[in-house]
Image (cartoon, coloured by chain):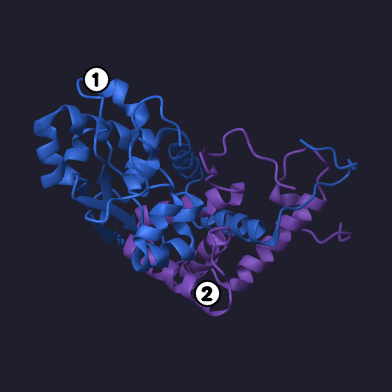
Amino acid sequence: MITPLPLQPHDDDGPVFQEPWEAQAFALSVELSRRGLFSWPEWTEAFSVEIKVAQAAGDPDLGDTYYEHWARALEKLIASKGGIDEAAVSERAEAWRRAYLNTPHGKPIDLSAGLNKPGSH
Amino acid sequence: MPHDGHDDFTDPPSDIALRVKALESLLTEKGLVDPAALDAIIDTYETRVGPHCGAKVVARAWTDADFRLRLLEDGSAAIAEMGFVGRQGEHMVVVENTPDVHNLVVCTLCSCYPWPVLGLPPVWYKSAPYRSRAVSDPRGVLEEFGTTLDANVEVRVWDSTSEMRYLVLPMQPEGTEGFSARKLEPLISRNSMIGVEKVLPPGNTR
């Protein structure tokens, strides 16, 4: 269930980003390199390594998994350069998941709604 | 917004979307990114940067001989002169199609692409089959895009890197001599600037 957003970029082959998170991952890489956490060549190196790893693991790499490689490369580079490790990301991702589940449909999602485990308050 | 038949909770997005969201919020808390800057980047690539920028460069090269010379001599400077600068546009090389030479751009490693003039790359450009076959069988790839070249035309394949981006200057279609740049721009497709297609005269559809 992917609902295209009004601002989602399209070209004559379809959406350039298939889902909003792809655009967010893209923007994070651009912004972090602009602010110097890593250089753009460092980014493209990390990204191409991630693509090769995925291909070696059997990913046919047809373009549809492109931003999955992107997000994984970004996570690893942030872990090594920004001091945010995999466990911290997992913990925060779970907090966001709980925030969605604790928020009535149609209301804005706020992280604070997910900081307490369900039933703990 | 589809109605999911529930009101008391919201379906969480996919795991990977949650991880990207987690990264963004952790980086924001550490002061390493500014959410407003991220929104501005997304907005820029969504609406302001796209193949219409590259088309302006090509149309000007077709109608302004001095600009064409500057563009082929120093692509970065000539493109910056038109106001198209950005993250990856710093080292741009413009390669010219002629009756004897057809140029094709690829990035075999990942998907380096001249974003400031073409926007974000299409899905096929990022795919492994295109990345490998553009090098091993460029004529076959061109055929798949409906582009047939005479046997005597040389195909040159340019492999982009994080430091070097290529933009193809396609041949101006016959019958458009004397057209203004503004009238030419809509004819110039993204694919023609990657080199997988030619620019067709007005009224021709693919």
**Closer-to-camera residue (A84/B46):** B46
Please, is residue B5 above or below residue B123 in the view?
above
- The spot of residue B49 in percent (x, y) is 39, 37
Which chain can be seen in purple?
Answer: A
Q: What chain does mark 1 sit on?
A: B
Q: Report the side of B151 relative to A35 (left or right).
A: left
Q: Which mark is residue B116?
A: none
- The spot of residue A10 in percent (x, y) is 53, 39
Asked whether residue B107 is in view, the answer is no
- The amino acid type, in three-letter code, at marker 2 is Gln
Task: Please tell me whether mark 2 sits on a helix, a strand or a loop.
Answer: helix
Task: Please tell me whether mark 1 sits on a helix, a strand or a loop.
Answer: loop
Q: Which mark is residue B180?
A: 1
- The amino acid type, in three-letter code, at marker 1 is Ser
- The spot of residue B115 in percent (x, y) is 36, 46
Q: For the point 53% across and 60% down, which residue is it?
A: A66
Q: Quadrant of residue A32?
A: bottom left
Crowd tier of the residue under label 2, counting other residues whose Cα lies within 10 Å: few below 14, some 14–19, many 20 or above? few
**Color of chain B here?**
blue
**Closer-to-camera residue (B12/B53):** B53
Q: Which mark is residue A55?
A: 2
Look at the image and tell me in which quarter the C terminus of chain A lies: bottom right
Q: Between label 1 and label 2, give the one nearer the viewer.
A: 1
